[in-house]
Image (spheres, grey):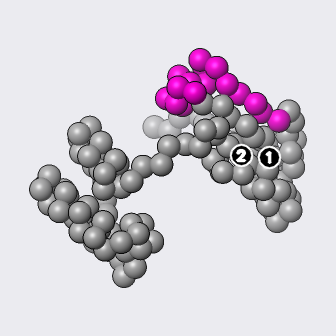
Amino acid sequence: MTISAKYVHTNLVARDWKTLADFYQTVFGCSPVPPERNLTGPAIANATNISNAHIRGMHMRLPGWGDEGPTLEIFSYIPDVPYYEIGKDLLPDVVKRGEKFYAYECNDYSKGIDTREKWDEVEDYLKKNNITFAKN
């Protein structure tokens, strides 16, 4: 059984929301939906799980849907959303929570991890915690 649902928006987080909004407006013909967002306070901290979150940005209406169509929420966080190092921060947390995930073998490890030594650390961690790879 399917539920009655309607797509209304997608959220994109960027370091520079104005540049990304300009790109979507220029290239795809998206149009701004005022007002510009400037959100902070306890409700935003609770929603984002970032104690000092301050969100700036704007909704952009997708072309071809009219005035009531779906939007892109293009936001920047102040301070930036925390950076997680895969081997040191992300994987231990994922394993601790019992989450499942997939990893893929690729020819250029630097795309996701900047040194082969870091990749070896991640791979050792995965093996020690009985996490297996799903290879493409």
> Mark 1 or mark 2, which has the lower sequence index?
1
Q: Are marks 1 and 2 in contact (CB under 8 Å)?
A: yes
Residue at point 40%, 79% (across, down)? 108
Q: Amino acid at mark 1?
A: Met
- Mark 1 or mark 2, which is nearer to you? 2
Q: Is residue 63 visible?
A: no
Choose between 97 and 120: the one closer to the eye. Answer: 120
Q: Which mark is residue 74?
A: 2
Callout 1: SS = strand
Q: Is residue 67 visible?
A: yes
Horizontal and vertical percent position of residue 48: 54, 31
Left or right? Give the position of 97 relative to 106.
left
Determine the residue located farthest toward the top in the rendered image.
42
Asked whether 37 falls inside the magenta stretch, the response is yes
Q: Compared with residue 40, is residue 17 higher up or lower down, i.e. above or below?
A: below
Choose between 10 and 86: the one closer to the eye. Answer: 86
Residue at point 79%, 46% (across, down)? 60
Asked whether 42 falls inside the magenta stretch, the response is yes
Q: Compared with residue 44, is residue 107 higher up or lower down, i.e. above or below?
A: below
Left or right? Give the position of 106 relative to 59.
left
Give the Cα distance between marks 1 and 2.
7 Å
Would you name the residue on which mark 1 appears?
60
Horizontal and vertical percent position of residue 14: 65, 51
> Circle 1: is it few (<14), some (14-19), or many (20+) Cα within 10 Å?
many
Residue at point 48%, 48% (across, down)? 83
Q: Which mark is residue 69?
A: none
- Residue range in magenta is 36-52
